[in-house]
């Protein structure tokens, strides 16, 4: 059997290691956030409108399938299914990092282009690392006629990888990408969160859209340590900011930038809490990938139909007729989160 390219092999390992470590209980700190119900919601469940402005397009729901995969045969299957499901739900779907396409275009093209083929009119997002140049970013966008580009920041993942990058000079590059490509650019983390200082830096170089992708779900320190046969670097994740902490960090920037949230989203309640804390929409990778790996596409569809029904129920319970109304619901933080916000001078 021919030896598989190491970068493609890594993508395959990510898929099964994400599943190996997936747990229903996330630790993104949503338990420390409480919403109060409204005893007089003055609405009819049928009136509830879940539609959401996602950057420049109206989508049916405030959720999206975040970056996962591309490059391998397995990726082709998952991207095909993710884009079909995104098409049916009318939500955005993101590609996994397209760096492997930039290096091996012929071998890997189909695993990415299937995202567009299965969802010709949909909001499909390309994904590249913060080290690619603007021309390479545009090549990735062009392949899938992307509606937006995600640029990922993954320092802790690279540090935990035996073959990881050692140089992290990204800001100027991001500035060039934002100024040059022909679609909106979202800068995202990969599950370790972002601080307000990071948001300040991104704002300065012209970034308008950020996915804080916090800690609490898929943990790349754990995944890469499982691939690293010499060192266990799981302790690197101790530096992470949870999704809820990152949302607190984003408060000073919420009127200047559009904030998306992801990382450890497990339940419709997590989605509503993230929106209440300022997220414009909420991304998930681990959860949808788990359903596709463990069950079938049709079972995953049923899971998401139920998920959407429950979003509606929660909105009724807090008296929200629209996504904008969610932001008015009373919210209570536990002592740990208040302590965090005080020490970080957020409140
Ligand atoms: C990811 N994620 C990711 N992110 C990115 O920007 N580019 C990528 O190529 C990948 N690859 C990838 C593979 C797999 C198998 C998973 C599960 C995830 C990170 C992802 O988009 C997200 O930021 C984190 O996974 C946190 O969200 P969840 O998984 O906790 O919902």
Image: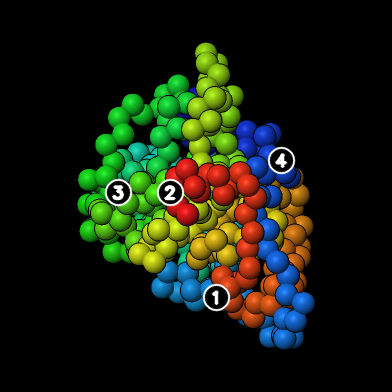
Judged by depth in the image, the label closer to the viewer, 1 or 2, is 2
Crowding at dot 4, Cα within 10 Å, few <14 / some 14-19 / many 20+, comes out as some
| Closer to the eye: label 3 or 2 | 2
Rendering coords of residue 148 (x, y %): 39, 62
- Residue linked to disc 2: 345
State how far apart marks 3 and 2 are (Cα). Answer: 18 Å
Seen as rendered, the residue at the extreme top is 230
**Residue sitting at 22 percent across and 45 percent down?**
172
Q: Position of residue 149 (x, y in %)?
A: 38, 57
Q: Are marks 2 and 4 in contact (CB under 8 Å)?
A: no
- Say whether residue 123 is visible: yes
Identify the mark nearer the N-term, 3 or 2.
Answer: 3
Please state which of the two labelled residues, at mark 2 or mark 4, is closer to the viewer: 2
Direction from residue 64 to residue 177 in the image, left or right: left
Element on which disc 3 rests: helix
Q: Nearer the viewer, residue 226 or 271?
A: 271
């Amino acid at each position: 059997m021919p030896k598989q390219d190491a970068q493609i092999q890594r993508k395959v390992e990510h898929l099964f290691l994400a599943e190996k470590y997936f747990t229903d209980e996330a630790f993104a700190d949503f338990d420390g956030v409480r919403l109060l119900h409204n005893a007089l919601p003055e609405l009819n469940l049928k009136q509830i409108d879940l539609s959401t402005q996602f950057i420049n397009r109206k989508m049916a729901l405030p959720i999206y399938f975040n970056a996962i995969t591309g490059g391998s045969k397995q990726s082709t299957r998952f991207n095909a299914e993710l884009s079909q499901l995104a098409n049916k739900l009318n939500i955005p779907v993101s590609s996994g990092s397209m760096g492997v396409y930039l290096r091996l275009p012929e071998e890997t093209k189909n695993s990415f282009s299937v995202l567009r083929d299965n969802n010709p009119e949909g909001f499909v997002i390309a994904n590249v690392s913060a080290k690619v140049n603007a021309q390479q970013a545009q090549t990735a966008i062009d392949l899938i006629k992307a509606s937006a580009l995600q640029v990922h920041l993954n320092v802790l993942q690279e540090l935990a990888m035996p073959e990881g990058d050692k140089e992290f000079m990204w800001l100027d590059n991001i500035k060039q990408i934002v100024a040059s490509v022909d679609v909106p650019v979202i800068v995202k983390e990969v599950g370790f969160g972002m601080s307000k200082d990071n948001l300040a830096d991104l704002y300065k170089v012209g970034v308008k859209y950020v996915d804080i992708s916090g800690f609490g779900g898929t943990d790349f320190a754990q995944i890469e340590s499982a691939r690293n046969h010499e060192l266990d670097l799981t302790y690197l994740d101790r530096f992470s900011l949870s999704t809820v902490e990152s949302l607190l960090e984003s408060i000073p920037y919420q009127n200047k930038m559009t904030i998306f949230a992801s990382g450890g989203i497990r339940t419709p309640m997590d989605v509503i809490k993230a929106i209440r804390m300022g997220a414009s929409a909420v991304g998930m990778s681990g959860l949808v990938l788990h359903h596709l790996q463990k069950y079938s596409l049709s079972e995953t569809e049923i899971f998401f139909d139920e998920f959407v029904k429950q979003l509606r129920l929660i909105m009724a319970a807090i008296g929200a007729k629209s996504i904008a109304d969610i932001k008015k619901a009373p919210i209570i933080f536990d002592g740990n989160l208040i302590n965090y916000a005080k020490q970080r001078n957020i409140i």
